[in-house]
Image (cartoon, grey):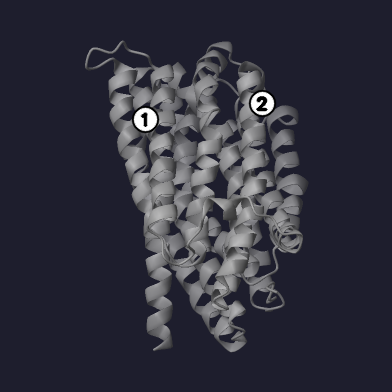
Amino acid sequence: MEDRYFYKTYFRLFAVVALQNFLVFGVNLADSVMLGRYGETAMSGVSLANQIQFFVQCFVNGAASGLVVLGAQYWGKKDVASIKKVFSAAFAVGLLIAASIGGAVLAFPAGVLGLLSTEPAIVAAGAGYIRIMGYSYVLFAVSFLLVSLLRSVETVRVGFYACFLALVVNVTLNYVLIFGKLGFPAMGEIGAAWATLASRMAELLFVLFYVFFIDKKVRLRPRDVFTYEGVYFKDFLKAGLPLVGSGGSWGIAMTVQTAVIGRLGAAAIGANAVASPVFQVVAVLYTASSSAASVLIGKTVGENDIPRVRRYTKKLQLIFLVTGAISSAVLFFTRDLIVGLYDLSPDTRAMSVVFINILAFTVFGSAYEAPCLVGIVSGGGDTGFVFRNDLIFMWGIVLPMSFLSAFVFHWPVPVTFAILKADQVLKCFVAVVKVNRYRWIRNLTR
């Protein structure tokens, strides 16, 4: 009976969250692919701008992860009132982050993107796109946090439906506005930006309607969103801030990586424009694994059933390894098909294939270490470890070595790219030891 509950719950959470996250990244991927047919410069500019969107998503996901960790543990105790209070704290933090970054890119679009690339035409294309996209960051944050609230109480399908709606709106409007159909002028990257903004609005309206008029588990009311209690806010900051810091650190690191690649020539920028969305889509699988594991482990810790936590941990690790092997194989054998979606120069095409080959190797490590550390360890209550681990590997090893590779030793671009992704493999050794010591089990509820 326990096995049936475990596998049914895990794969239900995994499948729906994976589909939801795929659709979230699919909105950006649709912009990139459709603009790839419009022009390489527009595609590269939007890819740069989408790194800022990815940066926002990392920070907001950190706040959402803190919400899910605490919410799932309270859900194990069936304490819905406390879940609402934790949500109000997470909402305040996530909204502040999204509004701050949105304000910065709206005020200095070219300046922000100029940090990522020295190619004037690419920066100009991205700046036009981000001037509109900056307004979508707050919309995304509100939707994502509400969906995460529902996920913490094992309601997961709503996020998928909302993201599916956003993707349909985005692709439809992309076709009309990018290429100038149905009497509209061809707007290129500007049309893609308006299409994405409209899709975020549709997504938010759908989620708001469900949360306030249909949901029967949390029964959130508008006043609950802005009702803060000091003890719960402190609890969220203690448990959630390390996850916000980890997500933000990851987002900053990915932005720095883009800046490094952005200084290695137009072919490298174009290849990264192809590889980045691919990596984000593949990352959907291990992100979904992390989310499902976090809810399962967090809820079980909240129920104070430690022997079952240990049994779940062993089963989850095996699932993560299988997921990684499948992801790597799919990515490797579809690399030519992926690159064929874009209209690229020969140099950019060749480098894109090499980049995807590297990702096919490193994603196996990602599929194990990320769910182990973000899902099991953080979900079990040790939310600070992931942040410390990321600081050591990313900022202490990967980024310094990539700078030396690119600007001191002048090694080939693919070598630098491989170094930038090396932490995904190195962290596996830490994950094996950390997870199987079980010192991360901590009940964070009141």
* Circles 1, 2 touching at the beta carbon (< 8 Å): no
Helix, strand or loop status at disc 2:
helix
Q: Which mark identifies residue 33?
A: 1
Q: Can you give x and y, in whole percent of width and height, for residue 246 in the image?
A: 68, 51
Q: Mark 1, mark 2: which one is toward the viewer?
A: 2
The tally of labels here is: 2
* Quarter of the figure that contains the C terminus: bottom right
Residue type at the position of mark 2: Ala
Residue appearing at x 43%, y 19% in the figure: 189
Residue 387, compared with residue 182, is above or below; it is below
Q: Can you give x and y, in whole percent of width and height, for residue 293 in the image?
A: 52, 68
Pick whichever, 112 or 268, lies toward us.
Answer: 112
Measure the C-alpha gap from mark 1 to mark 2. Answer: 27 Å
* Quarter of the figure that contains the N terminus: bottom left
Observer able to see residue 297: yes
Residue 308, compared with residue 79, is above or below; it is below
Circle 2 residue: 104
Observer able to see residue 332: no
Residue projecting furthest to the left: 182
Residue appearing at x 24%, y 17% in the figure: 181
Helix, strand or loop status at disc 1:
helix
Residue 376, compared with residue 163, is above or below; it is below
Circle 2: is it few (<14), some (14-19), or many (20+) Cα within 10 Å? few
Pick whichever, 321 or 2, lies toward us.
Answer: 2
Q: Can you give x and y, in whole percent of width and height, for residue 52 in the image?
A: 58, 32
Residue appearing at x 71%, y 62% in the figure: 232
Relative horizontal placement of residue 231, taking residue 173 as reference (left or right): right
Residue 343, compared with residue 362, is above or below; it is above
Tell which circle, 1 or 2, labels the residue nearer the N-terminal end. Answer: 1
Residue type at the position of mark 1: Val
Q: Can you give x and y, in whole percent of width and height, for residue 253 in the image?
A: 67, 41
